[in-house]
Image (cartoon, grey):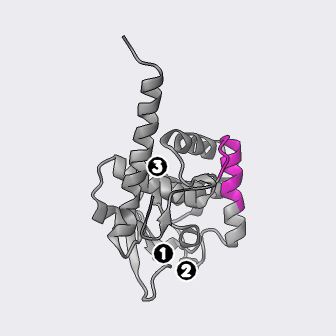
Amino acid sequence: MVLGTIQLVDGRGRKYLTAEERGRFLAAVAREPKPERQTFALTLAHSGARLSEVLALRPLDIDLDAAAIRIRTLKRRAEHWREVPLPAETLRALELVHGLRGVRPRRAGELLWPWSRATGHRRIVAVMERAGISGPQACPKGLRHAFGIAAVTAGVPLPTIAAVLGHADIATTAIYTTAVGIEARAFLARMWEHPTA
């Protein structure tokens, strides 16, 4: 099950959230009492970005009019930026919590979440725990992989998914099609266990 450099299932188990787990994660995010943690988790879940990429976001990287965020792809040698659309409700939350419409020019370059990578990771794992999600998928990378699988399942073309995720090689993105096959087999197995007349 390895194609490119991503391995979605290994000896420890599955490294992505299922659609049901993703729903539970988002429900737990909705109950998060600290708004800045909520916007962080929503941005991570709805952008497919890497943890470090989301932590690097600044007010000037949020384009409310275009309904997208501008992400610097960190896994490339040359500087590369990509634009990633976000759901309207996530953008509204970013706008309100971080005061994006009235941000002063000197604050536009400050980080939205001035946390270390370890702190960001801990905060996502805490939401996973509240959602009852455990295992190797209960981490920020599990959200990234879940985004890729959800995009494939929704019929988004692979080149578009590759662009949004910041993959230089579409072969890396294609691994998400194998996970869709894994999920389909799980659904079929349940059907075979409970046949109808």
Q: Disc 2 marks which amino acid?
A: Gly
Do the CB atoms of the residues marked 3 and 2 lie less than 8 Å apart? no
The earlier-in-sequence mark between 1 and 3 is 1
Quadrant position of the N terminus in the picture: bottom left
Q: Disc 3 marks which amino acid?
A: Glu
Do the CB atoms of the residues marked 2 and 1 lie less than 8 Å apart? yes
Calculate the distance from the C-alpha at mark 2 to the C-alpha at mark 1: 6 Å
Side of 14 relative to 121 (left or right): left
23, above or below 159, in the image: above
Number of marks present in the image shown: 3
Q: Residues within 10 Å of mark 3 (few under 14, many from 20)?
A: few
Residue holding disc 3: 89
At numbered mark 3, what does the secondary structure look like: helix, strand or loop? helix
The earlier-in-sequence mark between 3 and 2 is 3
* Residue that lies at the very extreme toward the bottom in this rendered image: 78
Give the number of the disc on residue 109. 2
Residue holding disc 1: 60
Magenta part of the chain:
122-135
The earlier-in-sequence mark between 2 and 1 is 1
Residue at image x 43%, y 86%? 79
The spot of residue 54 in percent (x, y) is 55, 68
